Image: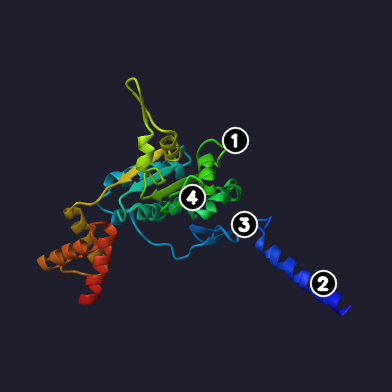
Amino acid sequence: MDKLDQFLDRAEGLLLRLESMLPQSGIQVPDWQAAAAFRWNHDRRTLDPVANFQRIALSDLIGIDDQKSRIAQNTLQFVKGGTANNVLLSGARGTGKSSLVKALLNEYAGQSLRVIQIDKQGINDLPLIVGLVQARPERFILYCDDLSFNADEAGYQTLKAALDGDLVAFSDNLLIYATSNRRHLMPEYMADNLATRQVDDEIHPAESVEEKVSLSERFGLWISFYPFSQDEYLAIAARWLLHHGWQQGMTDEVRRAALQWSLSRGSRSGRVAGQFARDWCGRTR
């Protein structure tokens, strides 16, 4: 009997461990009043409120006026109950793609806009998230930051079907905003272009090229971001310096230091400008 009891105890422990590894059948409904931003936890299948969401204003973002105008108009249409497009923000790193999405939440949170951040692994859970929000009065942006895929990844096909092609209608109160350094969200290789054919005077792209484009083109709005000029970089650095309490302005000394900082980093992005301002203000305080 002792051996039998030991076996049963071990079997029960094994079952408990297996149950903890299996996805839960019921999804816990979050407290929608706890925050304006939420993060999807893929392992626990829960929406966790983000209480300390970054407070970035649209007016703080300079050098991207056209991009701001286009995405703000799309978002305003959405929060007012009108039709709007899923958005792909792509281009140079550190140029404000992610900051722009955060600023939109701060701008329209008072009009019932909510943001749900999701990583690439969580994209497979899109049907669960749609089920949570589809009956809600709020308007939700599903925010995927720094998104990229390989063609054989499961989330690639899930997102592709959700954007356009799934038999199940997407929720009217949910849009997808994705940022990526890749315009087509997938790596592009020289071999893909070598397979392109010319038939008479027409160019027929290779199937691999068509497959790469097929995901990105399902976003209704493409917004591209480009490297900043030197003047734009310095203007952004000046804005960040003021934000961190520097009152002397862009003196010759500060200007030289800011340019040297960008040269050492090999980039004149807004992110680099912000990093310079934090370093400068910290050292001179």
Task: Classify mark 3: residues with Cα within 10 Å, few (<14), some (14-19) or many (20+).
Answer: few
The image quadrant that residue 204 belongs to is: top left
Element at label 4: strand
* Closer-to-camera residue (223/251): 223
Q: CA distance from mark 2 to mark 1?
A: 46 Å
Q: CA distance from mark 3 to mark 4?
A: 17 Å
The reply to whether residue 54 is visible in this rendering is yes
Q: Of the two numbered discs 1 and 4 on the same chain, state the one appearing first in sequence.
A: 4
Residue that mark 3 sits on: 29
Element at label 2: helix
Q: Nearer the viewer, mark 3 or mark 4?
A: 4
Which residue occupies the extreme top position in the image? 200
Q: Position of residue 156 (x, y in %)?
A: 50, 45
Q: Are marks 2 and 1 in contact (CB under 8 Å)?
A: no
The image quadrant that residue 71 belongs to is: top left
Residue that mark 2 sits on: 8
Q: Are marks 2 and 4 in contact (CB under 8 Å)?
A: no
Q: Are marks 2 and 3 in contact (CB under 8 Å)?
A: no
Q: Nearer the viewer, mark 3 or mark 1?
A: 1
Q: Quadrant of the C terminus?
A: bottom left
Q: Of the two numbered discs 3 and 1 on the same chain, state the one appearing first in sequence.
A: 3
